[in-house]
Image (cartoon, coloured by chain):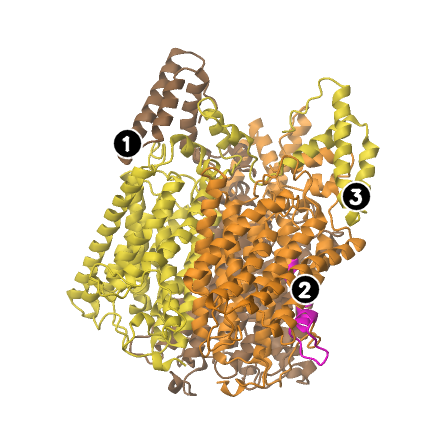
Chain colours: A yellow, B brown, C orange
Amino acid sequence: MSATRTNATVPWLYNITVEDSNWIITSAFMIFTMQTGFGMLESGCVSIKNEVNIMMKNVVDIVLGGLTYWIFGFAVSFGRSEFNNGFIALGDFCIDPSADNPLKGAIFAAFLFQLSFATTATTIVSGAMAERCNFKAYCMFSFFNTIIYCIPAGWIWGEHGFLKKLGAVDIAGSGAVHLLGGSASLASALMLGPRLGRYDNGQGPLPLGNPVNAVMGLFVLWWGWLAFNSGSTYGLSGEKWQYAAQAAVTTMMSSFGGGTVSILYTMIRLGGRIDALDIINGILGSLVSITAGCFLYQGWEALIIGVIGALLVCTSMPLIDSIKIDDPVGASAVHGVGGIWGILAVGIFAQSPEPLDTTNGRNGLIKGGGWYLMGVQALTVLCIGSWGVCSTILMLWGINKMIPIRMDVHQELLGADITEHLVRHSQVGVSRALSAFRAVLDTKEADNLNSVGTNPFHEKHLGLVKLLALKRRRLSRISRIVSRNQNLGVKKVKWIFPKWKQSVKDAAKQDIASKEGVTLAWVH
Amino acid sequence: MSATRTNATVPWLYNITVEDSNWIITSAFMIFTMQTGFGMLESGCVSIKNEVNIMMKNVVDIVLGGLTYWIFGFAVSFGRSEFNNGFIALGDFCIDPSADNPLKGAIFAAFLFQLSFATTATTIVSGAMAERCNFKAYCMFSFFNTIIYCIPAGWIWGEHGFLKKLGAVDIAGSGAVHLLGGSASLASALMLGPRLGRYDNGQGPLPLGNPVNAVMGLFVLWWGWLAFNSGSTYGLSGEKWQYAAQAAVTTMMSSFGGGTVSILYTMIRLGGRIDALDIINGILGSLVSITAGCFLYQGWEALIIGVIGALLVCTSMPLIDSIKIDDPVGASAVHGVGGIWGILAVGIFAQSPEPLDTTNGRNGLIKGGGWYLMGVQALTVLCIGSWGVCSTILMLWGINKMIPIRMDVHQELLGADITEHLVRHSQVGVSRALSAFRAVLDTKEADNLNSVGTNPFHEKHLGLVKLLALKRRRLSRISRIVSRNQNLGVKKVKWIFPKWKQSVKDAAKQDIASKEGVTLAWVH
Amino acid sequence: MSATRTNATVPWLYNITVEDSNWIITSAFMIFTMQTGFGMLESGCVSIKNEVNIMMKNVVDIVLGGLTYWIFGFAVSFGRSEFNNGFIALGDFCIDPSADNPLKGAIFAAFLFQLSFATTATTIVSGAMAERCNFKAYCMFSFFNTIIYCIPAGWIWGEHGFLKKLGAVDIAGSGAVHLLGGSASLASALMLGPRLGRYDNGQGPLPLGNPVNAVMGLFVLWWGWLAFNSGSTYGLSGEKWQYAAQAAVTTMMSSFGGGTVSILYTMIRLGGRIDALDIINGILGSLVSITAGCFLYQGWEALIIGVIGALLVCTSMPLIDSIKIDDPVGASAVHGVGGIWGILAVGIFAQSPEPLDTTNGRNGLIKGGGWYLMGVQALTVLCIGSWGVCSTILMLWGINKMIPIRMDVHQELLGADITEHLVRHSQVGVSRALSAFRAVLDTKEADNLNSVGTNPFHEKHLGLVKLLALKRRRLSRISRIVSRNQNLGVKKVKWIFPKWKQSVKDAAKQDIASKEGVTLAWVH
C-alpha cells in the first residue's frame, strides 16, 4: 500500500492512497460522461439546422480545452514554483511526471481529475454562444478559454490562491466551475448579440430542436453530477467516504427540491402546462446550487437550497431575455445565478465536516459561524463573477479583431450545419433559405448536397427500375435478375452487380431513346 | 479504516466498511443511469406526438418519487422504531443523520443505494400508462407510488418484514422491484383502458416512435443492470467481492440466453423477420428473471433461467394484448411475468452462497433443498403480485376522484406533447388532428406554435430577402450588406444588425406599397 | 482480505485481490457501455432506412458473441489444459467455477473482464458490413466471429501464446482487439462489395443518417475507452494504481493530439469546413493508437502518438475508398490502420513500467531498448493482420455457401429496416422504392405498414371527427361528448369510450349514407 506516502510533506493534491485513487479515477471517468450530457442537452435545445454545429463545438471544447489545460491550464491553477502568487500559479507547465517520480501516480490522478473539471467548465459557455458564433472564432475561444477558467480555479483551490487563503469554500465548483461558466456565458451572449429576429415577437422562447435529446442530456448530467460532487471528497480513506456518501445524497435531495418547485413554477406560468426547458434548467440550477457545499449540509438543507436555486434560475431566465441578452440554452441563469446562490448558501448552511479541514473549522450563519465565512463567500462571488465577465469580453474582443465572432447573416439564416459542416437537413427551412439566397449567393455546392439520412445513389437506381416497370416492358427480365440475386454466391456478387446495373441502365436508355417526352422529373 | 464499525450490533444495512462504501456508492451511481435507459426506451416506444410527455413523466418519477422516498418511503421499508411490525416499518421518516452520528456515512450510503432502487422501481409503471394518462394525475400517482413500492420492499428486505423472516430470497428485486412494477403496470393499464382505437384492427402492435432510441434504452438498462445485480452484494469486503463478480457474469449469461431465444422467437413469429420490441423485451425479461438470485446460480443455470424468462415474456405480451389490456411498452410482461419467474427460479436453482447468509443456508429444489424455499418464494409472488395489483387499483381509483386519470379524447388524439408541453411535431398527424378539432375546440394557441426544430423568425427574414431578390431590385444593396457583414467588428454587430433588418424591411415595404397583388403567401 | 490468494502458483489472470476486483469489475461495466457508443455511432452513420438494422446487429453481436465467448471463446484464449500450444488454448470450455472453487470469484471476474473485451471486438466489424449484409448471414457470422477474435487474443494474452512468449506487448488491444477488428472489417467490406451505386459519382461520402447520434456515439466510446485502457492494469494493488492513472491520462492526451490534427486536416481538405466523420474517426484513431502501450508512455509521447494515429486514419479513409472498398463507417481505417500504428508505437516509445513485468523489462527504440521489441511488435502486426483478413474471408465464404451474405437487390434498395424489421421510415425514399418495385414484387405487406412514430388508429378517428365537424351537423353532440369526458370517472372510462366511438361512427355512417360523393381521401 501507499501508506508511507500519506504524509504532510506532500501537497494535498498528491496526498492520496490507493483507496483514494480508485475513487478519484472512477469519479473522473464519470465526470467525463457529462460531456455527453452537455452535447445532447445543447443540441436538443437549438434549432435543427444548427444541431451538428453545437455537437462539433462540444468536441472542440474537449480537444482544444484539454490540450491547453495540459500546456498551461493546470500550471496556472495548481503549478508549484517560486513565482506563484495569490493571483496565479506559474509552475508545472506541460505536466508530465517521469518514470522515477515517486508521486507519479498521484500526479497523473490529480491531473486527470482536474482535467475532467476543466473540460466540463469550458463546455458550459458553448450553449450561450449557440446558433450564431463563427466556428473558427469559437475554436480560438475554446483554445484560450482554459485560461479564463484556470486562474480563478487557482484562487479557490490552489495552495497559492488568495481566496483559499482567506478561507473561501467551494467544494465542487459552484463558483470556480459554474459561476465562472455562467458569467462567461452572459458576457459572450452579450458580445454576440441576439440571434436574427430573436425578439421580433416578444421574448417567447424558440421551439427546441429535439426535446427528447435535451431531457436525455439532463439525465446524463444528473448522474454525472453525483460523481462531480461526491468525487470532490478527493478520496475515500479516513472519514472521506462518509462525506462522499453525504455529498451524493445532498445532490439528489437538492435536485428533488429543485425539480418539484420547477414543476410548480412552470405549471403556474403556463396555466397547467409543463415546459421542458423550465424543468431541465430548474433541476440543473438546483444541482449547481448544491455543488459548493455538497457535504456540508443536512438533507433538509439541501432540499431548501435546491428549491431556492431552481426558483432563482427559473425566474431569472425570462429576466435575462427581457434585457435582450439571448442565451439559447439558459446557461447564464443556470450556471451564473445558480452558482452565486450555491456559494452564498455555504455561508448560510455550512457545517464544518470534522475531521476534514474543508471549511477550516468555520460554520455558516445558521450554525452559529458568524459573518466571516459569509463575507468571504460574497467576495468569492464578486471576484469570480467580475473576472468571468471581464476576461470573456476582453478575449472575445481580441478574437473578433482576428476572426469576426458573429456568423455572416447568410450563414446564420442558412444554419451552421450546412455552411460549416455540409450537413443538409430537410423539412426545417434550409431549402427555403437556399432559395431565398440563390440570387445573391453562389449556392451551387449547397444545392448539390443530399439530405441527411438519404441514399441519393439508390434514388437513381430506383428511377431506372421504375421507368422499366412503368413501361411494362422488360418486366420478366428484371424479375429474373431479382430472383437470381436470391442465390448469389460471393463471386457472383462481384460481377452480377455491375452487370445488373448495366442491364437496367441499357434498358432505360433504350426506353428513353425510343420515346420522346418521357419525364424522369422525380429522379434527381 | 472502519473496522471497528463492522460488528454485529449495527443493523446489516449500516454495517459497511470503507471498501464496501466504494462499491455501494459507485453501484448506486450506475443504477441511476438506468433512468436514462427507461426514458429512452419508453420515448422510443410511444408515438412521436407523446415522446416528450413520457420523458417528462420519467423526470417527475425521479423528482417526486425521490422526494417521497426521503419523506416516508425509506421509513416504511427500513425505518427503525418500536412500532415496526411484519407488515410495515414506521421509523426514520425524513432520514437525515446529524454530524455527530457515528453511522452517518453508512446511513447516507444505505439511503442512496435504496433510493436508486426506489426511483427505478417507480419508473417501470410509466411505460404502461403511456399515451393516455393525464399528466397531473400522473404527478399525483408518482408522488404516492412510493408507498406502493416501499411496503413490500420492507416485507422482503427490512429486518421487520414477514417474508424476510420466513426466509424469502430476492437479492436485487425480481419481486420487490420488478414484479411489483409489473403488477402495478398491469393494473394501471387495466384502469386506463386501451388507447383510442388500439384494437380496431386486431392486436398488431403500433409502430414504434423511434426504434433506435428504444434499442439505445435497452443498452443503457443492460449495463445499468450489471450494477443493479452486482451492487446487491452490498459491498466487496470478506467474500462479497466473489459474489459480486458472479452476479455480473450470471446477469450477462442470462441475457445471452434470453437474447438468443428472443431472436429465434421473433424469427419464427414473423417468418424470418426481427421485431425490435420482441428482442428488447425478451432481453429485459431475461435480466428481470436473473435478478432475484443473481449470485446463487452457476453460469449454465443463468443461461437457462434467461431462456425461460425471455420465452415467457415474449409469449405473454400477445396474451396481454389478446385480453385488450393495452400496455404500450410491454411493462406488465417484462417486469411482471419475468419477475414471477425470477422469484420462483430461486426456489429451483439457488445454491446457498457460503459464507454469506443470503438464503439462510437453504438451497433450491435441484440442489436438494426441498420445498420450503420454493414455498416461501411462491408466497412472495402471491403477496407482492396481489399487493401490486390491488394497491395500484385503489390508488388510481382515488386519484381519479380528484383528477380524471384518462386524458380527454381531444388531448389523446392531438397527443400529449402539444396539449401538455406546447411541443408541436410535424409530419406525424398533429396538424391533421388540429384541423379536425378546429370546429369544436379553440385551437388558436396550438395553431400558433412553431414546429420542433424550426426557427420561425428566420423564415420571416428570408421572406423579405427573397422578395427583394425576386424583384431583382435592390440586389446590389443586399449583396453589399452581406459582404460588409463578413468584416463585422463587435461594435458593428450591435448596430448593423438592426439596421440591416430595417433596410430589408423598408425595401420590402416599398415593394409591397408600389405593387398590388404581391403575394407573400409562404411567409408566415 | 484475500492476501493469501495473491501468490505465484495462481495464473496471473486469477491472481487478484479484493482491491483489484473492484477495479476489474467496475472497468468491465464501463467497457460494456462502449456497446451503446458503437450502436449510436454506427446507426448515426448509415442511411436512415438501415438504422434499426444496424442497431439490431449490435444487439446480436452482444448476445451471440457473448454466448460463444462462454462456450468456446474464453477456452481458446485463456483455457488451461494439457492440449494448449502456442497457437491455441483448449481448456475451460463453458467455464463455470463451482461453489467450492477457491478461485471462483477471480475466475468470474476474469471472465467478465475478458467478455467485455470480446463483445467490443466483435462489434467493430458490424459497421463495415452495414447497409448491405443479409441479417441471417450476419447472425451466423456473429456466432462464429468469436473464434476469429479469440485465437489471436490467446497469442498475445494467453500464457500459451507464441507472441506472448516472444515478448509482444499489447496492453489493451490495439492489436488483439482493433487491428483484428479492422482487418476483419476490410476483408468483409471486400467480400460484400460496395453498396449499390456507391461509386457512381466518385468517392465522395454519403450523407450521414444522424450526425448528432454519431457524435454522441463518439462521446460514449471516448469515456468507455478510459476504462478500457485504464482497466487493463487489471487491478490497483501494489503499484498498479499508478499505472491506471497514467493510462487514463495518456488516453486523453492522445485524443487531444488526434482531435487537434483532425480539425486541421478536415479544414484543409474542405476549405475551412469541418466534416463530422473526419473528426470522429480521427479521434477514434488516436484512441486506438494509444491502446497498445497506454501506460508505457509519457504525456507528450501520447500526444505525438495520437497526432500520427489520427493523421494516418484520416488519410487512409479516402485511400480505402479509392480502391472501391466500401466501409460505411471507416472501421478498416480507424481500427486497422490505427491498430497497426498503435502496436508499432510500443516498439518506439515504450518505457518498462517498473515493477510490473508488462514489457518484460524491455524498452522502445528511443528509450534505448534496441530493435528486438520493435521486431516482435512488427511480427504481431503481420500475424494478426493476416489472420484477420484470411480467417474472415474464409468464414464469410463458408457462410455464403449456406446463406448469401449480400442482401437481395430489392432489399438493399428498400432498406433493411422495412424488409427485415418491418420498420417504415417516411421522407427518406422508402415510399419511392416501394413504388418502383410494386410492379415486380409483392409489396402489399410493406404498403400496409404505418410510418415510424405515427398512430394510424387515431387518424381514422380524426377522419370521422372531421367529417362530422365539416358537416356542421352533430356539432353540439360532439362537444357535449368532449366536455363530458373532462369529468370521466374510472368506470365511465370503461363504457364511454366504446360508446363515444360508436356514436361518432354512427354519425359518420349516416352522413355517408345520406350523401354521395363525400370524399374521405385525406383519412389514412
Residue type, numbered disc 1? Lys
Q: Residue at x 50, y 81 (%)?
A: C17
- Residue C146 is marked as 2
Q: Which span of residues is magenta-colored?
A: C60-87
- Residue A485 is marked as 3
**Residue B165, placed above or below residue B449:** below
What predominant SS class does the magenta segment belong to?
helix
Q: Are marks 2 and 1 on the same chain?
A: no
Residue B474: give x, y in percent of width and height: 38, 17
- Residue B274 is left or right of residue A376, and the answer is right
Q: Dot 3, how many residues are within 10 Å of its Cα: few (below 14), some (14-19), or many (20+)? A: many
Q: Does residue B43 appear in this view? A: yes
Residue type, numbered disc 2? Thr
Q: Which residue is mark 1?
A: B492
Residue type, numbered disc 3? Asn
Instruction: State the SS at label 1.
Output: helix
Residue B116: give x, y in percent of width and height: 46, 66
Q: Residue at x 29, y 38 (%)?
A: A401
Which quadrant holds residue C477?
top right
- Residue A286 is left or right of residue B309, and the answer is left
Is residue B427 or residue C116 the one in the foreground? C116
Q: CA distance from mark 2 to mark 1?
A: 62 Å
Q: Does residue C438 appear in this view? A: no
**Residue A97, placed above or below residue C334:** below
Quadrant occupied by the C terminus of chain A: top right
- Chain letter of the residue carrying label 1: B
Question: Total of numbered circles in the picture?
Answer: 3
Instruction: Find out whether residue C79 is within the magenta segment.
Output: yes
Instruction: State the SS at label 3.
Output: helix
Residue C177: give x, y in percent of width and height: 60, 62
Q: CA distance from mark 3 to mark 1?
A: 64 Å
- Residue C357 is left or right of residue C437, and the answer is left
